[in-house]
Image (cartoon, rainbow, N blue to C red):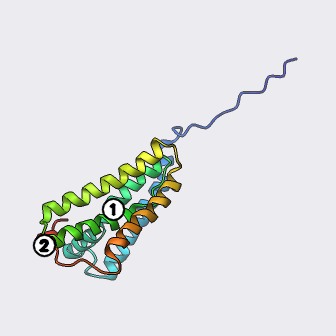
Amino acid sequence: MTDTPAPRHIPDRLDKPLSSAIFSWEALLVVIAVVIFAVNSFASPYFLDPWSLSDLTFNFTEKGLIALAMALLIISGEIDLSVAAIVALASTMMGMAVQAGAGTPVLVAIGIAVGLACGAFNGLLVTRLGLPSIVVTIGTMSLFRGIAFIILGDQAYKGYPESFAFFG
């Protein structure tokens, strides 16, 4: 008499690909999005107006770009809590450049350079020193916000070039 267990059936996700696709979480989200668009288009005649859609995309483009990068970080199992502080520091440096008379191309270069430098500093601390990303980014969040606050205080920079307003 042998004590070998009976073979078990391990379900395969590809047994019924159509039904698993229809009843997936992603399909539910698509259905909810379509329902929201349909209800809103009947509730307001201006919802699907080209001007309204253009204004909606204009207002979330920056957030979408930041969310894309954050999604890649989260997928890799890391987190970056210093993103808003990096944006604050970059915009402070850009404001300083405006006060010195810099034009739009220089402002864009300064914003990108500050963002790259801050991100490289975070990356160096995480990859070379092996520190947890959440600890590093909490610390650099305070550091970058502090630098921006020391430079700017409770003031605001004004006088950006007209071409900078339409850059995005």
* Residue assigned mark 2: 161
The residue lying toward the viewer, choosing from 13 and 90, is 90
Question: Residue 160: x percent and y percent?
Answer: 17, 74
- Is residue 11 left or right of 150 when viewed as pictured? right
Marks 1 and 2 close (CB-CB < 8 Å): no
Question: Residue 21: x percent and y percent?
Answer: 47, 48
Q: State which mark lies toward you, 1 or 2.
A: 2
Looking at the image, is 44 positioned above or below residue 132? below
Crowding near the residue tagged with mark 2, few <14, some 14–19, many ≥20 C-alpha atoms within 10 Å:
some
Report the residue that reaches farthest toward the front: 150
Question: Which residue is at a point 19% across and 67% down the rendered structure image?
Answer: 97
Q: Which image quarter is the C terminus in? A: bottom left
- Is residue 89 left or right of 133 when viewed as pictured? left
Looking at the image, is 84 positioned above or below residue 71? below
Question: Which residue is at a point 36% across and 62% down the rendered structure image?
Answer: 86
Question: Which residue is at a point 52% across and 47% down the rendered structure image?
Answer: 131
* Three-letter code, disc 2: Pro
Question: Residue 57: x percent and y percent?
Answer: 26, 68
